[in-house]
Each structure stands twice: as structure tokens, then as C-alpha cells.
Image (tube, grey):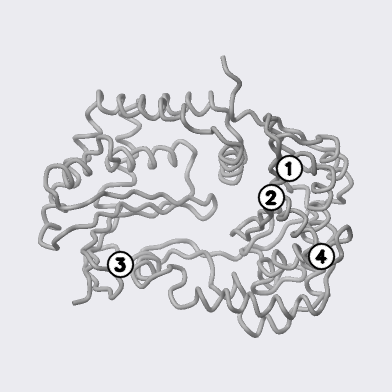
Amino acid sequence: MPPDRLHFEKHVLKNGITLFTHDHEVPFFELRVLIPIGSVHSVPENPGGMHGVAHFLEHILLNRSQKYPEKHSFDRFVMLSGGYINATTKPFVTDFELRARADLAEKAIPGFFSHIFEPLFVEEDIELEAGIVSNERKQKERYYPGTTEFTHYMYTQWKRDQLYSLSQSLGAESDLKTLTTEKLKAFHANYFQKDIVVFIGGTFPREVVIEYLERVPVQEIRLTEALESSSWGNRSYHTHSFRDIEHTIYMYGGITGELSEAEENGISFVGKYVTDSTHGVLYNWLRKEKGWSYSVYFSLWYLGKKGGDWNIEIPLNDDRNVEAVRKELHDRMLSALHNTTEVHVEVDRLLSDQLFRFQTLQERMDTAVDMYLERKVVHSEEKLRELMSRYFKDIDFLMDIYRRYFTPEIAGEFLALPQR
């Protein structure tokens, strides 16, 4: 048997920080540090808290540190040697990412950790970064939480589907003007939690990673979270016109609460099974039989405490075709789910498809991190295959998923029309 490509060894360090390691023979390493602080924590109730502070802090931390006090000197060291460094503020976590050559690891790893845990705050950097974040917010504010008129409507009128305001995420202009070194230091103190999780893969000095992380002083910290739950704005079938689309789009989708792992995977399987281009019943009908659509798209977004959101998007050549789609959609989906032979063929196809996945270190790291962020667990390849076979070949399980999430009594729909 070949080695499991998703084998991550779990270590709980002396101070409680969790470390996952993945040995892989490549001349570089990838490092991810997950700090359990995100935009949901950017509220005044938390120490140093205010709107936009988590995201702003993420920007500032990569400027200077005790090991690299000259601004952006660590960035230059990493990038000029062909590496990569970045950070992202997510709803519940700030995700720091480093990729560097293995021969530079003993310098790059402590340097990266120093930016996260030993930053230097300089007033002139704060003033400059405020302008950068202000520009970032202005680019997003017109259609937030979407990126177009169409997606803005989807997430505010069809579904009320946003975790928090843009101001909570990025800070209003008034928030950015009041940020100080003292406020950032106070909020940065929240970083030192036992819930920190670190992933490292490739070729790396394990002892350097462990030695540094075990020196990080951490404690139990519980912060206030401010986030909204998704809800329907207008679930009933209706039409709406948009200036930024060129064709008719039929949208069918749903909102879920918190899901078990089986439920999340079941929704994903059903949605992809009926829409994929291999033998998806909706794809075959609308493209191959009717020629009404180029493709059919399924998406599922799931965020633990936030719940889930899924959509089937069907672009159509003519809005006169929509009644046929609405009339036949569910009969065709049910027929496909009752077809035990085709369901098993699809599961076997997905199992075969897994052979082509996890070829790169980045894909392995991304998969492991995503699993952890969703479920606080990292499954092996073998476990993923076992779960796929167990759940997806069970027709009763799939029908239960359909009844609870895909029926017209549960889901919502609308027709997007180009403005003429």
C-alpha cells in the first residue's frame, strides 16, 4: 500500500498548542498558523475590540517583528528567495501562510513566528495601513456581501446571508482613524490562546517548530462573537431584473442550520450528482437533450456555527424555458436518486477521481486545514474513502437528505432576468 497522502501526525505541545506535521520529500515546506480570532470577534465587548480590528491587525503583523524590525524585510527575504507569505482574516480565524525553501527553514520559521507573536507596532505604519484598508473597503462596499448587483441581491434579498456588516469586517472610516498602538496591542493579546493550531508539511526541522511554539505563553481565552444567522428574504418564486447579467438564470437553493459531517457531505453529493457533467441528470437534460444551457452549477458553503448555504444555478437561453425546468426539476432529481446503479457508478467515479488528488503539498495542506476548520478533525485518505462508500451508496440516506434539504417546501427559488 502506498503511504497515505493525508497522513498528518497530531502533536499537543506542552502549552496546549496543537501541531499537525506532514513529512513529504520536497525541497521546501509550507506552514499554516491558525489563530482563533476572526471578524466575528471585532466588537467592543472584547479586550481591545472594535470594528475592523481583527483584519487590521492581520495587515500590521506582517510589517515588522522583533527578529525583523525593518519594515517588510522578512517579506523581501521570503519573496526574493522564491517563497510566499500571506495572511487572511476569516470569520472565526486568522490564517497565516508561509512557503519557503527547505534550506532556509531554520531562519524563515522563527522569523514567521516572530511576526505573529512578537510584532512591532509603529504609529506611522498604522496610519499608512489605515489608508490601504480604507481602499479595500471602498472596493467592496457597493455590492457587499456580493461582488455584483446579481450576487448582492442573492445574499441580501433572496437570502439574508451575511455574517456581519462590512464595517465589522473592515472597519468604518471613523474606526480606522481611532486605531492606536495601544488598541492593537490589547487586541493582539487575545492571540495567545491554547486553541492555536499549526500545520507544517514538506521538509522541515521539527525541533525548531516545536521549540519555538512551546515558548509561546498561552492561556484559556473566551471572546464574544457577533454574527448573524442566515434567513430567507423572499423564498417564494419570483423574478428580478439585473443590469449586470446577459442571460436568464434560474436559481434554486437552500439554507441550513449547523450540520453533521454526514449531512454536509450528503448535501454536497446530491447537489453534484444531479448537476455534474459526467452523468448529472440536470446537465444531461438541459444541455445534451434540450440545448437550453451551457452548464449547470452547484455550490455549497458551510461554516459550522453559521450553518450552510447551497445553490443550484441554471443559466438558460430563454426565460420561456423556466416553466419546464420548474415543472420537471424534482421528478428528474428523484428519479436519479432512486437509480441505485447510477448512484453506485457515481460513487465509484468519485473514488477513482481521488487517485488524481493530493498530488501536491499545497493541495494536501489546504485539504487538511479546511477539514480542521470545518470539523476540528483531519481525516486520512482511507477514512475519506470509507465515509464516501458508507454514506453515498446508501439510497435511504440520500433520500432523507433530499427530503430535508432539496424539496420545494424547504428550498427557495427565483428567476434572474437581464434588464432590457
CA distance separating discs 1 and 3:
52 Å
Secondary structure under tag 4 reads: loop
Task: Classify the position of the C terminus by image quarter.
Answer: bottom left
**Residue type at tag 4:** Arg
Above or below residue 160? Residue 332 is: above
Q: Which mark is residue 101?
A: 1
CA distance separating discs 2 and 3:
49 Å
Using residue 373 as the reference point, say whether residue 141 is left or right of it. left
- Closer mark to the observer between disc 2 and disc 3: 2
Q: Quadrant of residue 58?
A: bottom right
CA distance separating discs 1 and 2:
8 Å
Find out whether the residues at labels 2 and 4 contact each other: C-beta distance under 8 Å. Answer: no
Q: Identify the residue under disc 2.
A: 82
Q: Nearer the viewer, residue 346 or 354?
A: 354
**Residue type at tag 1:** Arg
Secondary structure under tag 1 reads: strand
Q: Which mark is residue 234?
A: 3
Query: Which is nearer the N-term, disc 4 or disc 1?
Result: 4
Find out whether the residues at labels 4 and 1 contact each other: C-beta distance under 8 Å. Answer: no
Image coordinates for residue 270, horizontal then vertical, percent: 33, 39
Query: Which is nearer the N-term, disc 2 or disc 3?
Result: 2
Find out whether the residues at labels 1 and 3 contact each other: C-beta distance under 8 Å. Answer: no
Query: Which is nearer the N-term, disc 4 or disc 3?
Result: 4
Residue drawn where x is 68% and y is 66% of the image: 54
The crowd level at tag 4 (other Cα within 10 Å; few <14, some 14-19, many 20+) is: many
Find out whether the residues at labels 1 and 2 contact each other: C-beta distance under 8 Å. Answer: yes
**Residue type at tag 3:** Asn
